[in-house]
Amino acid sequence: MNGGQWCVLALIEVGIVVVANGLHAGDLVVDTDFEGGSARVVEIDQEKSAITVMPGGDPERGWPAWWYFRVNGLTEGQPLTVSVVGSSRLIPQGHPGGGKPLSSSWARPSRATWSADGKTWHQSEEGQRDKAKTTYQLTAPGETMWIAWGPPSTPSMVNEWAEAIAAKHSFIQDFTLATTREGREVRGIRVENIRDGGTARPVVWFHARQHAWESGSSWVAMGIGEWLAGDSDDAKWMRENLVTYIVPIMDVDRAATGDGGKESVPHDHNRDWSTNPHYPEVAATQKRIAKWSKEERLALFVDLHNPGPSDGNAFFYVAPNEAIEVSRRPHRSVFLDVISREYDGRISLNRKTRSTGPSYHPLWHQISATWVTQHSNPQAISVCLETPWNTAHSNTKGYYSVGAGLMKGASKFLQTEFESSESAN
């Protein structure tokens, strides 16, 4: 056995990260030197065309669940076996699970995601799972193949989407929310058909990726944007009567570096909603929410996430009863009922909600949907939508359909709200 036939890189516990120019091992090359790239190579078997990796993220920058790499040196039609194991790095002390590695279940989806060009993403067949690893059987589409935990949605990809949809539609504007602590722009789109100089319309706000590894939530956000740009009567009504903001990535810094974001140091974006936020993009959103709420214009706030590996249905987290007045609870229930009735996404939606109360997390008061509930005008709805990442429909089309399905219900609810307000006036 020689080095050209067999290359084993022992990375467990030694802290070596595969970066820059990739790991050269005979013919196959594993590369993570691109935006969002993240993997630590455990083993490459050239004879068997088999690669074993683990997530490459720094636990201080969030849970190491995300992996995304490129394989060069393939030939079209070549079988490729990819196995994924959990990260061996320890979660920082003082955070849930601190002092231990993250459970590997977060890093081992039932299906991998792959692409021939880094733009169009496909799901693999279901992988073979054992206690230590999940193994996926792939076929190379050509010399190069991109492989990931789920469909990547990097800051550059999102910015290109925002620019393209804004260029195509006069009622959509690309905007910058904030500049991150590491100097990157947090961008999104604003959807409104402005007439007669514009008016102070009710506001709808969507954002995603407060936890950077939850890439599927960005696709849900973009699905919302595509629905709003469509020709349905409900989409046209939304454009004519409300202003909608969509920010597909909040934690741009960790999305760019391929880190997890969740439970990062000192805390993640969705634990940062306090009087003194750590992240500029959270502070910028709070400022907007406070202004609109003072004007009694905030109609709907939705925080988009992906949940745990065993969740098979989409569902909503809502602020606990401790954080919402009794008088507001029926209004929120009506919203959830309408969404449940109108929703038709490929991924099923469970009407039963979960709560982000005191038993959920020590910083439960600093979770975005709870903070907005406590600081918004009385008629505003504030929720968190969780879309599962571990199903046969957890792909770009499935995520887009969740965004569209959500909007079909939200638009119906908001039209009823608008009509009630007009009648009252």
Image (cartoon, rainbow, N blue to C red):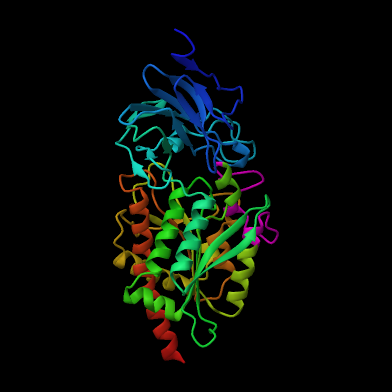
Relative image position of residue 210 (x, y in whole percent): 54, 53
Relative image position of residue 147 (x, y in whole percent): 42, 37
Q: Residue at x 51, y 49 (%)?
A: 154
Rendered view: 87 above or below 402: above
Query: Residue farthest to the top?
Result: 1
Q: Which stretch appears magenta?
A: 258-283
Whether residue 320 is visible here, answered yes or no, is no
Q: Nearer the viewer, residue 225 or 166?
A: 166
Query: How many badges with numbers are in the image?
Result: 0
Q: To which quarter of the image does residue 117 belong?
A: top left
Q: Residue at x 65, y 43 (%)?
A: 265
Whether residue 99 is visible here, answered yes or no, is yes
Query: Residue farthest to the bottom?
Result: 425
Q: Residue at x 33, y 41 (%)?
A: 123
Magenta span contains residue 265: yes
Relative image position of residue 216 (x, y in whole percent): 43, 50
Q: In the rendered image, which quarter contains the N terminus?
A: top left
Q: Nearer the viewer, residue 23 or 68?
A: 23
Magenta span contains residue 26: no
Relative image position of residue 176 (x, y in whole percent): 60, 63
Rendered view: 364 above or below 47: below
Rendered view: 87 above or below 278: above
- Left or right, 224 with reference to 213: left
Q: Main secondary structure of the magenta part?
A: loop
